[in-house]
Image: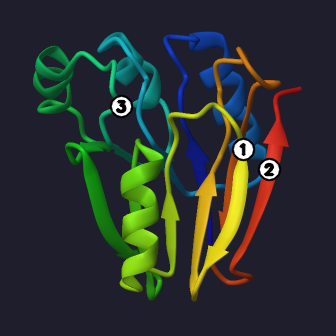
Amino acid sequence: MKIGIISDSHDRIENLNKAMEMMKDEKVSELIHCGDFTAPFMINELEKFPGNVHIVFGNIDDRYRTTKKVENSENVKLYGNNFEIEIKGKKIGAVHEPFFANMMAKSGDYDIVFHGHTHNKKKEKINDTLLVNPGELMGRKEKPGFAIYSIEKNKIEFKELR
């Protein structure tokens, strides 16, 4: 099973759609957005993903209108500032800010923790927990990209938009 991880899309609909198309080709079945999608209309785009979408708020997201929009969504679930879920036996955490992601990873309660905010892709190991920033979908600091996590292989692969 593969999970797509994106962050910091900042209203870039075209980049989000390209990323989701690439994920479809890679047979990604779940999607995590680590915040800073920005406007509630991005939920319309995320709803096009064929599987479950898990999102957390970033520091610039429109919280009130997004919460209202997600209430009627069938496949997009909003968790607030952070979440923890279990998929196929892997305990997964996500949050926008790296400070909190580091705390989550250091707790030892997770197999993998995802975050965004810095717009820089990163993968590191903290004790037994993998800590990952998928980079930015926006394309301001780096080429627009995302990450794919293979649960069976416990492996992260970074992708750039084509």
Foreground mark, 1 or 2, reads 1
Name the residue located 37 percent from the left edge and 69 percent from the top edge: 104
Quarter of the figure that contains the N terminus = bottom right
Q: Label 3: which residue?
A: 58
Name the residue located 24 percent from the left edge and 42 percent from the top edge: 78
Camera-side residue of 100 and 56: 100
Name the residue located 80 percent from the left edge and 50 percent from the top edge: 158
> Which disc number belongs to residue 121?
1
Which of pointers 3 and 1 lies earlier in the amino acid sequence? Answer: 3
Q: Secondary structure at mark 3?
A: loop
Q: Secondary structure at mark 2?
A: strand
- What amino acid is at disc 2? Phe
Q: Label 2: which residue?
A: 158
Camera-side residue of 41 and 129: 129
Return the x and y of residue 8 as percentages of the image width and height. Answer: 53, 27
Which of pointers 3 and 2 lies earlier in the amino acid sequence? Answer: 3
Return the x and y of residue 162 as percentages of the image width and height. Answer: 89, 26
Foreground mark, 3 or 2, reads 3
Name the residue located 67 percent from the left edge and 84 percent from the top edge: 152
Camera-side residue of 44 and 150: 150
Q: Is residue 160 at least partly visible in the picture?
A: yes
- What amino acid is at disc 3? Gly
Decide if residue 144 is on the left or right side of residue 48. right
153 lies above or below 82: below
